[in-house]
Amino acid sequence: MRFATTMSWQIREGLDQHLAMALYVRDAAGLQRYVVTEPDVGALAPAVPAPAGSGHHLTPDEDDVGADVGADVDLSQAVREWPIWWARALHQVPLTQPPTTPEELREAAPPAPPDWHGLQDLPAMRTLAERHHHDIRHWLREIKHNEIERCRGRRGSSDPLHLTHFVNAYAQRLGRRVRPFTLHLRLLPLQQPAGWVLDEQQVLLSTALREDADALERLLEPVVSALA
């Protein structure tokens, strides 16, 4: 988690592992064809290996598009459950401060063994999450490693995304200090540079867009305007 901050405002950013995990399971199980992702975030990067196809299809007309849910998971049930998982992860507001109690830590963390918190009533998703858990962890480690390397390459700048300068410049245009606010940037490793305003305190954006300071500022300007 990184942040740009002053005494009166704070912009926090970090990889949203829960959303990334749900997307990985979607892609690893070949569910993209069957589920609606709102917002439509597109493909992950690095891409998840395409499923080989198990013959579990919704209709005979879709035999050319395989799903790899396995014999122990009903595809129709997986298709019903995945949007529920995605919506839960999307509406899980990031904590402003690090968790201080075991319960806060449990609520903030993505589903994981042994209890797979948040998937207890989604048996198909729990099975798929358990099946791909090792690969998800390896994939997330690779992303985090790449992120560390990018940060090292930008060393020397106290605010690589220029967000402090951006907010301060906005305050100068206003002719006053901005009002106190906290804004969460929830990052996803996506192939396309894209971003979505979820609400007045949350923005979902791809790591590709985050690297484009000008595009990021254009996305954030109306958000900061409403907050400041």
Image: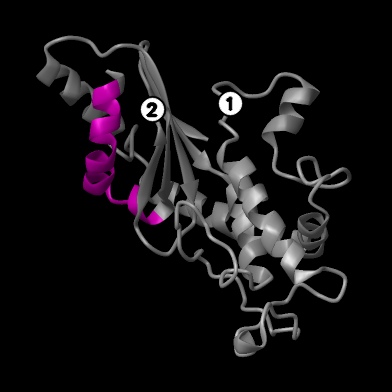
* Dominant SS type (magenta): helix
Q: Give the range drawn in magenta.
A: 208-226
Q: Name the residue under label 1.
A: 95
Residue in the foreground of this view, choosing between 157 and 166: 166
Q: Is mark 1 on a helix, strand or loop?
A: loop
Residue 76 vs residue 183, the one in the foreground? 76
Q: What residue type is labelled 1?
A: Leu
Q: Does the magenta stretch include residue 35?
A: no
Q: Is residue 101 above or below residue 149?
A: above
Amino acid on which disc 2 is placed: Glu
**Few, some or many C-alpha atoms within 10 Å of disc 2 (few <14, some 14-19, many ≥20)?**
some
Residue at 80 percent of width and 54 percent of height: 126
Q: Name the residue under label 2.
A: 200
Q: In this view, does 204 lie to the left or right of 106?
A: left
Instruction: Check whether the beta carbons of the residues at disc 2 and disc 1 lie within 8 A of each other.
Output: no
- The x and y percentages for residue 228 are 27, 18
Relative depth, front residue between 62 and 103:
62
Q: Is mark 2 on a helix, strand or loop?
A: loop
Name the residue at 74% across, 70% down.
75
The residue positioned 21% from the left and 46% from the top of the image is: 214
> For mark 1, does the 10 Å Cα neighbourhood hold few (<14), some (14 to 19), or many (20 or more) residues?
few
Cα distance, mark 2 to mark 1? Answer: 15 Å
**Percent x, y for residue 8?**
35, 11
Q: Which residue is drawn at 37% across and 56% down?
A: 208
> In the picture shown, does residue 224 fall above or below 66?
above
The answer to which image quadrant residue 132 occupies is: bottom right
Q: Which of marks 2 and 1 is in front?
A: 2
Q: Where is residue 102 in the image (x, y as percent from the top left)?
A: 79, 24
Q: Is residue 5 visible to the viewer in this orientation of the structure?
A: yes
Determine if the magenta segment contains residue 216.
Answer: yes
Image coords of residue 146 (percent x, y):
51, 57
